[in-house]
């Protein structure tokens, strides 16, 4: 066969022996080759062959790694694109059953949620319109949400009927959620009857028919097809586009259910399929006004006011409560006040307790800017004596009426008196103070007797007194006032000493300077002392008080030899002596 | 469930409305209120175990002022021809109506009901007329909307014929 090509028999070359032989020998093979050639060239047979193996090939490839799928994907995509471009209806139809219900569900859900929104509820609860609706809901027994929906409705197809045109028998019926409906069978038949009636009564020609019927607040739109009718019960004002939707739906049903419609004999089962239902769903449209969710600004302001008002009320109430508690604490801490009971009573507070009359006025403990209104306080305090140190002290003060020179101090239960006071007061005070509750002991160790003090002071004053005389004279030129004063002091000395139980003696000592003789000086000093003695007696001084002594120049007042010093020594001085009475009596 | 449109045909006051009322609601009223236009009711029943829903079109009875509105008959799967047993002339009227119906919608199953069977006193219909019709293969039944006699059977009989 290697050279078969070069020596291939030409047609009509019948007398070549070799080719005859070859034909004889190789006929079956020849025919087979011809067959194969034909098969290769004839596309019809080719397709036939491939179609036999293709399903298996696809199945195998899918089982493997999916390279076939990857290889096919771009082509399939292109096919879809072209198909959609050419006639989108097929795809729309295919997708419709999925998209329609999904969208409807989403809208229904959104609406439901929208209504649950707080602002909605408020709006619908407080506005006049809302109240009217509430009333309507109550009156009609419908849920409030539904009433709101109805009022915010632009339109809603509540029911769709697919009706067999001739018999008026209902083929399929759909109703929107939450819509109560009459017996659909009867409605369907009635609609047809009405159609028939209209057609007959108004002598409508051929295919003319009623396309809209008004029934109360429902409008029924009727779309007539050759075999079936679509009727939609609509609430509100539906747009003309809806008519288009009805029409399309009806057309599509006629297309797909042509046979079933033509041969209809009363069995609607053929139309109770999901496909028909989904097609009909297209007609169940609805549209709501947006303003449902808008809150009126007035309401907002009202709400705001209400909130701030409520907030302020709570705030003041809390503040007052706090202030009251603080006030109670202040009261309890104030000395002399004991709170036994504190309660809040109808808008105010009642406080009961004990109060020392010396304690602060309870209302005065309320700060000037205290948020607590005094008008709202009802205070009842029983009087009692508190043993607080400050009060014991004050009461002691009142009881003892101490002179200004005395200071009272309480240490524990010991009353300390310091300063000086008349002896009589002191002994009285010692007695009285112990009668005072809260005072267990009186300490007067630091309290000096007033008269003794005075006496000492007087003694000192008198001892320092120097009555001067001129050189060689026995008459002092000391002015009358000084002398009178001296006499007064002496009288006082006598009185004070007597109170103290002492016997006073005042010695008038006469002095002279050192010039001159001692005898002369002695005489001079004697005369000077006598002069004063006489004068004092003349001024009413008790003679028993005074004694006279001449010191001459032996007891100089000043040791200085200066003229001033010498002048000091020409004088009379006083020596005051106080002796206990008994001793003096002896 | 299979639904069939059934029309009630007959002269006025023969008891069409009363029969439907009896059949659907088991009620009866002596009061006569003439029907205007059409009133539709429905009732389900079992025919040989098979559920069937009748959509009953109760049409206004024909008299000298009102003639049957033929469009209402369209799509009817069955007819009930009602006659008042006390008024023989109502039989002629219903036969005429039947002919009109056939002309409009073709032959459909039907049954002839001779109503007011409870009023034996004034029974004036000629039994021979009825026998002649039965001989032609008609189904004729005596009914009384007042007592309920024969009413269920009448509707069931028609139901059965419609399903055959
Ligand atoms: N006794 C008796 N009275 C009946 C019976 N059926 C109907 N009636 C009475 O007959 C009168 C007319 O009955 P309807 O049912 O209103 O008659 P209809 O055929 O509907 O009349 P239209 O609507 O005017 O055509 C009423 O007073 C009924 O009470 C029956 O079986 N027996
Ligand atoms: Mg009637």
Image (tube, coloured by chain):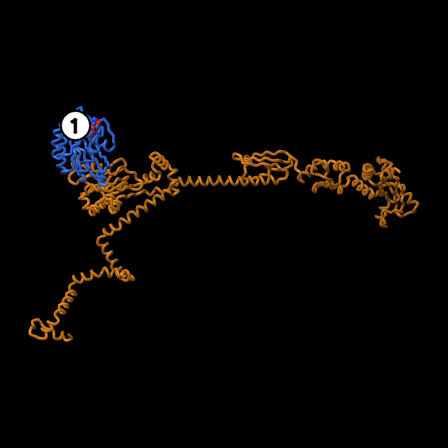
Chain colours: A orange, B blue
**Residue in front for this viewpoint, A464 or A243:** A243
Name of the residue lying farthest toward the top? B121
Q: In this view, does A38 lie above or below A321?
A: below
Q: Does the residue labelled 1 lie within 8 Å of ligand 1?
A: no
The quarter of the displayed image where residue A531 is located: top right
Q: Kindly identify the residue that appears in the image at 23 percent across and 37 percent down.
A: B45
- Could one spot residue A484 in this view of the protein? no
Name the image quarter holding the N terminus of chain A.
bottom left
Q: Is residue A241 above or below residue B133?
A: below
Circle 1 SS class: loop
Q: Left of B81 or right of it: where is A380?
A: right
Residue, disc 1? B85
Residue B98: x and y in percent read: 14, 34
**Residue in front for this viewpoint, A577 or A435:** A435
Chain containing the residue with disc 1 = B
Q: Left of A440 or right of it: where is A21?
A: left
Numbered marks: total? 1
Q: Kindly identify the residue that appears in the image at 38 percent across and 37 percent down.
A: A127
Residue A483: x and y in percent read: 82, 39
Residue A345: x and y in percent read: 53, 34
Q: Residues within 10 Å of mark 1 (few under 14, many from 20)?
A: many
Q: Left of A473 or right of it: where is A267?
A: left
**Residue in front for this viewpoint, A262 or B152:** B152
- Could one spot residue B110 in this view of the protein? yes
The quarter of the displayed image where residue B139 is located: top left
Name the image quarter holding the C terminus of chain A.
top right
The quarter of the displayed image where residue B44 is located: top left
Residue A367: x and y in percent read: 57, 40
């Amino acid at each position: 066969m290697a050279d078969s090509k070069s020596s291939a028999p030409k047609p009509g070359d019948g007398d070549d022996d070799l080719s005859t032989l070859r034909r004889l020998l190789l006929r079956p093979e020849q025919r087979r080759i011809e067959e194969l050639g034909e098969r290769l060239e004839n596309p019809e047979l080719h397709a036939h062959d491939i179609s036999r193996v293709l399903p298996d090939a696809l199945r195998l490839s899918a089982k493997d790694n999916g390279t076939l799928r990857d290889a096919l994907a771009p082509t399939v995509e292109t096919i879809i694109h072209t198909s959609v471009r050419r006639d989108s209806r097929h795809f729309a139809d295919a997708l419709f059953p999925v998209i329609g219900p999904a969208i409807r569900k989403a809208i229904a859900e959104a609406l439901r949620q929208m209504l649950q929104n707080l602002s909605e509820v408020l709006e619908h609860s407080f506005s006049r319109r809302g109240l009217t609706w509430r009333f309507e809901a109550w009156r009609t027994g419908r849920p409030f949400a539904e009433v709101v929906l109805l009022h915010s409705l632009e339109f809603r197809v509540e029911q769709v009927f697919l009706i067999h045109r001739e018999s008026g028998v209902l083929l399929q019926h759909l109703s929107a959620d939450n819509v109560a409906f009459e017996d659909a069978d009867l409605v369907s038949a009635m609609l047809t009857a009405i159609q028939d009636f209209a057609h007959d009564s108004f002598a409508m020609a051929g295919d003319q028919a009623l396309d809209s019927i008004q029934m109360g607040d429902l409008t029924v739109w009727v779309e007539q097809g050759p075999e079936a009718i679509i009727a939609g019960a609509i609430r509100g004002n539906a747009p003309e586009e809806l008519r288009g939707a009805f029409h399309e739906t009806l057309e599509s049903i006629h297309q797909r259910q042509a046979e079933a419609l033509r041969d209809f004999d009363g069995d609607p089962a053929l139309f109770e399929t999901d496909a028909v239902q989904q097609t009909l769903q297209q007609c169940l449209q609805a549209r709501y006004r947006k303003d449902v969710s808008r809150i009126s600004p007035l309401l907002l302001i009202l709400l705001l006011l209400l909130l701030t008002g409520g907030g302020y009320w709570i705030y003041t109430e809390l503040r007052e409560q706090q202030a009251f508690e603080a006030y109670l604490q202040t009261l309890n801490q104030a000395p002399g006040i004991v709170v036994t009971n504190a309660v809040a009573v109808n808008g105010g507070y009642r406080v009961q307790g004990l109060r020392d009359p010396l304690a602060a006025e309870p209302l005065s403990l309320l700060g000037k800017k205290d948020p607590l209104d005094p008008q709202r306080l009802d205070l009842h305090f029983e009087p009692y004596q508190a043993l607080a140190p400050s009060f014991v002290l004050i009461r002691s003060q009142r009881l003892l009426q101490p002179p200004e020179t005395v200071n009272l101090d309480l240490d524990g239960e010991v009353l300390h008196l310091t300063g000086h006071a008349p002896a009589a007061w002191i002994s009285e005070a010692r007695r009285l103070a112990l009668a005072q509750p809260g005072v267990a002991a009186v300490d007067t160790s630091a309290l000096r007797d007033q008269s003794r003090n005075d006496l000492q002071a007087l003694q000192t004053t008198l001892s320092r007194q120097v009555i001067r005389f001129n050189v060689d004279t026995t008459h002092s030129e000391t002015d009358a006032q000084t002398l009178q004063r001296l006499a007064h002091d002496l009288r006082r000395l006598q009185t004070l000493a007597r109170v103290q139980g002492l016997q006073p003696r005042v010695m008038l000592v006469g002095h002279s300077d050192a010039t001159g003789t001692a005898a002369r000086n002695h005489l001079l000093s004697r005369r000077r002392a006598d002069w004063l003695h006489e004068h004092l007696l003349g001024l009413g001084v008790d003679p028993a008080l005074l004694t006279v002594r001449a010191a001459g120049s032996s007891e100089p007042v000043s040791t200085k030899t200066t003229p001033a010093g010498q002048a000091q020594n020409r004088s009379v001085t006083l020596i005051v002596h106080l002796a206990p009475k008994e001793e003096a009596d002896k | 469930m299979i639904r069939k449109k059934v029309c009630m045909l007959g002269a006025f006051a023969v008891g069409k409305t009363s029969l439907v009322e009896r059949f659907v609601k088991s009620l009866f009223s002596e009061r006569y209120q003439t029907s205007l236009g059409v009133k539709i009711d429905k009732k389900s029943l079992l025919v040989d175990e098979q559920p069937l829903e009748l959509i009953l079109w109760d049409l206004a009875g024909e008299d000298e002022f009102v003639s049957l509105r033929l469009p209402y008959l369209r799509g009817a799967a069955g007819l009930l021809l009602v006659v008042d047993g006390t008024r023989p002339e109502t039989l002629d009227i219903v036969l005429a109506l039947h002919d009109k119906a056939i002309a409009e919608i073709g032959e459909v199953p039907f049954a002839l009901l001779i109503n007011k069977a409870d009023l034996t006193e004034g029974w004036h219909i000629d039994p021979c007329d009825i026998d002649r019709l039965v001989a032609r293969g008609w189904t004729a039944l005596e009914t009384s909307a007042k007592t309920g006699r024969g009413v269920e059977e009448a509707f069931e009989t028609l139901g059965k014929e419609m399903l055959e």
